[in-house]
Amino acid sequence: MNILEIENLTVWERSTGKVIIPGNSFAVKQGSCLAIVGESGSGKSATCRAIMRLNKPGLVQAGDIYFKGENLAALPEKEMRKKRGKRLCMILQHGMRAFDPSCVVGVHLKETLAEHFDWSRSDIVENMKHAMETVMLKHPLDIMNSYPHQLSGGMLQRVMIALAIVLEPDVVIADEPTTALDTVSQFEVVEQFIRLRERLGNAMIFISHDLGVVRKLADEVLVMKGGSIVEQGTSEAIFRNARHEYTRYLVSTKLALQQHFQRLMGV
Ligand SMILES: Nc1ncnc2c1ncn2[C@@H]1O[C@H](COP(=O)(O)OP(=O)(O)OP(=O)(O)O)[C@@H](O)[C@H]1O
């Protein structure tokens, strides 16, 4: 069963009419992870933001976005706001941008949770504390009392994953959540995404340039180029037996980089 069905999604620039996404259709199965890959500027983020209806005002979108059969594209903004966070949760590339730099992290967490749950302040703190411990964040209360700039990128991403654990969304959309991190933090954050899926059994859309991460996480892969979908299939099929030349190019470039890295490391 599909939890998300995107039909004929079109995104264009308001001022020039330039088409960025030319009427794409795809689906995400309940409980599965769909990775979106493709070169920079291929429309991966615009697609995900369109699902959340969070593209900048300079971009216009059309098409249908069925979430559990309900068309998100037709909802008033007030209703859509209730879906964001609780039903569909987006984790961004730069953890820093998700938080208000002028407030301690706990303020954002409390505001987000108060929007979706009828919890007391202490319930919120207790639930967040427990979730933060789950993602291996030590001293959660200190973290909640820190400003975003006082925390590392990896810590902020783990705070976002902890928030997702508490919100229990049906779909997590992660837009290159590991790109801005160092290798060790990337590894830790990917591990936490794997655990998040095991824990919630939810669906995920995962955008990444790192095909190693994609191979580890994704059940299905969608390949984009110039706004269009050039290929989609199971992770196994894409990595072992890609049909499209562009997909083969992406996979072989990744393999070449991996071999180069292994040679450098003397593996
Ligand atoms: N607010 C905007 N106004 C105008 N054009 C935009 C806007 N946002 C994105 N675009 C354009 O849409 C196209 C797709 O951008 P998008 O950010 O979705 O690509 P991407 O595949 O996510 O790239 P990256 O991997 O670098 O994040 C690009 O040509 C980009 O310049």
Image (cartoon, grey):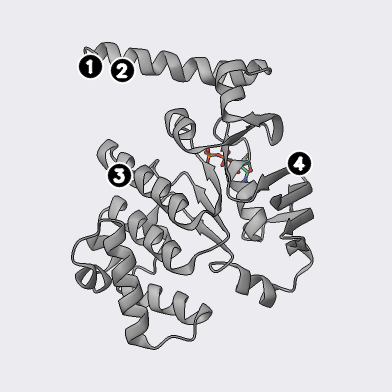
Marking on residue 24: 4
Inspect the image, locate mark 3, and give the three-letter code of the amino acid beneath it: Glu
Per the image, the residue denoted by label 3 is 188
Q: Secondary structure at mark 3?
A: helix
Inspect the image, locate mark 4, and give the three-letter code of the amino acid beneath it: Asn
Q: Secondary structure at mark 2?
A: helix
Inspect the image, locate mark 2, and give the three-letter code of the amino acid beneath it: Phe
Inspect the image, locate mark 1, and give the three-letter code of the amino acid beneath it: Met
Upstream in the sequence, badge 3 or badge 2? Answer: 3
Q: Is mark 3 within 8 Å of ligand 1?
A: no
Density class for disc 2 (Cα within 10 Å; few <14, some 14-19, many ≥20) is: few
Disc 1 and disc 2 in contact, CB within 8 angstroms = yes
Q: Residue at x 52, y 57 (%)?
A: 90
Upstream in the sequence, badge 1 or badge 3? Answer: 3
The span from disc 3 to disc 2 (Cα, nearest Å) is 20 Å
Q: How many marks?
A: 4
Upstream in the sequence, badge 4 or badge 2? Answer: 4
Marking on residue 265: 1
Task: Please tell me whether residue 192 is drawn above or below residue 88 in the rendered image.
Answer: above
Q: On the picture, is 150 further left or further right than 131?
A: left
- The percent position of residue 148, horizontal first and vertical second, equals 30, 64
Disc 3 and disc 2 in contact, CB within 8 angstroms = no
Q: Is mark 2 within 8 Å of ligand 1?
A: no
Q: On the picture, is 204 further left or further right than 58?
A: left
Of residues 238 and 25, which is closer to you in this image? 238
Marking on residue 261: 2
Q: Secondary structure at mark 4?
A: strand
- The percent position of residue 238, horizontal first and vertical second, equals 60, 24
Density class for disc 1 (Cα within 10 Å; few <14, some 14-19, many ≥20) is: few
Ligand 1 is found in the corner quadrant, namely: top right
